[in-house]
Image (cartoon, helix red, strand yellow):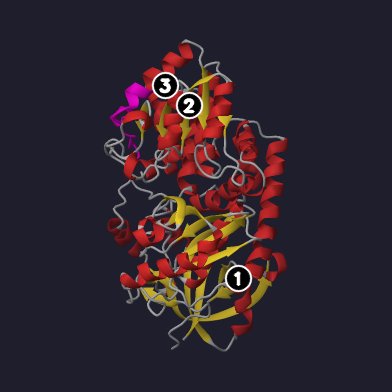
Amino acid sequence: MSLLSLTGKLWKIHRPEPQDHGIVDLLRKERGIADDPAGKLFDPFLFPEMQKAVDRIEHAMKKKETIAIFGDYDADGITATAQLVRFFERHGITPLVHLPDRVKEGYGMRKESIDLLREKGVSLIITVDTGISAHDEIAHAKSLSIDVIVTDHHRPSPRGDGAMAGKSLPYAVIHPLVPSPIPNPHLCGAGVAFMLVRALEHGKPWNGIEIDIALASIGTIGDLVPLVGENRLLVRHGLKCLENLPPCPLKDFVDSVRGNTKMSSTDVAFKIVPRLNAAGRMAHPTIALDALLKGGEALEQLHRLNSERQTFVDALDEEIGVLVDSKHSFIVLAHKNITPGTAGLLASRFTERFSRPSLIAAVLDEKAVASIRSIPEVDAMECLGHPSVSMLLTSFGGHSQAAGCTFEPRHVGALQEALNAVLIARGFNIETMKPTLEIDAVLHPSSVTLACAETIESLSPFGQGNDEPVFLLSAQTLSDFRLVGTEGSHLQLRVGGVKAIGFRLGNLLEHLHVDQRYDIACRVGVNAWNGKETVQLIIEDIRKT
C-alpha cells in the first residue's frame, strides 16, 4: 500500500479499527460537546469595563454627540459594524462609519482617519475588531478631545495589556482578555460587538434580534475562532435564525446563495463569508456593509466582486505558484502582481498545499504588505515577534494561525532566512512538515447510511475546534466517475454504490480504474434533491490500496 495518497498527503488515522455509527458518541465525548438547548450566553457585564462603555455611549446618545464606528474590512469586522449601526438606527441615531481601505490604509486605525472624523464633529469613536494595539492613534484621538471605546479580540501588543496607561489609554476596553479574561476568551470581533449590543439593550430582547444573532454567527464562522462556549451557542442559534429571518437585506443575501438544504456552518464559510470579504479585497468594504444593511445593488455588486475575485486569484495562483520555493520551512514570497486583498488567499492555498507557514506579500512602492497563514503546530505571532524577525518589520499583528505584517521590500530575503531559522531552532524542517490529512476513524461500509449522516450532523455546527469528522472507507471499488463543475474541476463518482463528490479533485480522474480498489477519506453527509434525502460522501482524498 502506498504511504502517500493521490494528492501527496500522509494520512494520520486516529482509530485504525473499523467502527460503526457509535463512533459519533465517542467523538461527542472527546470534543466535550454537551449541548444544552436552554443554554444561555454569559452576562455581558462580566466584561470589566462594560458598564463604563455603556454609560459613555448612553451619555453620547442623550447629548446627541456625533458617534463614529471604526471597523475592519473583513467579514468579522463588517458583521460587527453592522450590528452597532443597527443598534444606533433602532434608537434614531445615524452613526458615522469608517471601514479602512485595505490598499490605501491597511488594517487598523490611522491618525489621518481620526482627523477626518474630528472634522465631522465626532466626539466618540467605537472600534470594532480593531484598536487594542492602536496606542499612538488613541493618544492622538484624546488630544483632539475624542473618547475611544475599544471593542476588539486580537492579541494585544505589549502595551495593550493591563499595563496600558497614560495618553494611550482608551476610555473603555471591551476585549475577552483585557484588562482581565472573561468566561470565553475566544470571542471574535462580531461576538464582542454582540455582547456590547446586549449590554446596551440591558439584556432585553429587541426588534430584529434574530438578525443580529445571525450576523454575530457569520462573523464567528468567518474569523475561524474555536466553536466553544458562547461561540458554539451563537453559531447554533445563528444558523436557526438564518432559516427564519424576517424580510430584510440579510434574508435576501442568504436566499441568493442558499442551496436545497438548510444553511450549515460550511455554507456560511464558503458562500457568505467569501462574498463579504470580496468587497474589501477587490473594491471597498462598505459595499459588503451596504449589502447587509441595504441590499439591492450593493448585494448584486458583491456577487460580481466575488466572481472576479475567484477568477483573479486562480490566475494569480497559476502565475505566482511556480515561484514558491518549497525547500524552505517557512514560505516567503513577495511580488508586484499580488494585491493586499489576495495575499491572504494565496497564503492559505500555499499553506494547505505545502503544509507549512506562508508569508505572501504585495509590493506597493516602498512597502510590502503581507498576510501570514500557518499550520496548527506553528504560532505565526510568536514567529513574527521573535527579535530576529520583528526587527525587519514595520508592523505586525493578528492571531496564531492568521496574521499580517508590513516591511520594506528589500528585507524579503533576510525575512526568509530569519523565519526559517526560527522554525529550525524549534525543531521544524521540511522533512517533518509533510502535508497530512487527519482521519478520525475507519468506518465500516455498512454504517454509511442516512441515519448515520444525520447522527453526525448532530455534532454540528462544525468549525475551528470542532471539525466535521473525516472517515476512512477501506478497499473500496469505484464506479461512474466523471468530471463536473466549472472546467471539470470536481470529481463525481460512486463509492461502493454510494454517490460521492470530490470538490477540486478533478485532476485525480486519470489515476482511477474500475478494476482497482482504493481507500477513501471522506465526510458523510446528506444530499437533498427534489424533496428526497439520501446519504452522500464528500471525498477529501483517495489512496491506492
Q: Is residue 423 visible?
A: yes
125 in relation to 317, above or below:
above
Magenta highlight range? 37-53
451 in relation to 195, above or below:
below
Viewer-nearest of discs 1 and 3: 1
Q: Amino acid type of disc 2?
A: Ile
Q: Amino acid type of disc 1?
A: Gly
Check disc 2 and report the residue beneath it: 125
> Tag 1 or tag 2, which sits nearer the N-term?
2
Q: Amino acid type of disc 3?
A: Glu
Q: Give the quadrant of residue 480.
A: bottom right
Which residue sits at x=68%, y=40%?
Answer: 299
> Is-magenta flag for residue 46?
yes
Q: Residue 311 location in percent, x, y?
A: 69, 59
Q: Label 2, secondary structure: give it.
A: strand
Which residue sits at x=32%, y=29%?
Answer: 166
> Is-magenta flag for residue 48?
yes
Which residue sits at x=31%, y=41%?
Answer: 184
Q: Residues within 10 Å of mark 3 (few under 14, many from 20)?
A: few
Q: Residue 358 location in percent, x, y?
A: 48, 64
Locate the N terminus by quadrant.
Answer: bottom left
Q: Is residue 403 visible?
A: no
Check disc 3 and report the residue beneath it: 201
> Are the two marked residues, 2 and 3, in contact with CB atoms closer than 8 angstroms?
no
Front-most of residues 86 and 149: 149
Check disc 1 and report the residue beneath it: 321
Q: CA distance from mark 1 to mark 3?
A: 50 Å
Viewer-nearest of discs 2 and 3: 2
Q: CA distance from mark 2 to mark 1?
A: 42 Å
Q: Residues within 10 Å of mark 1 (few under 14, many from 20)?
A: some
> Are the two marked residues, 2 and 1, in contact with CB atoms closer than 8 angstroms?
no
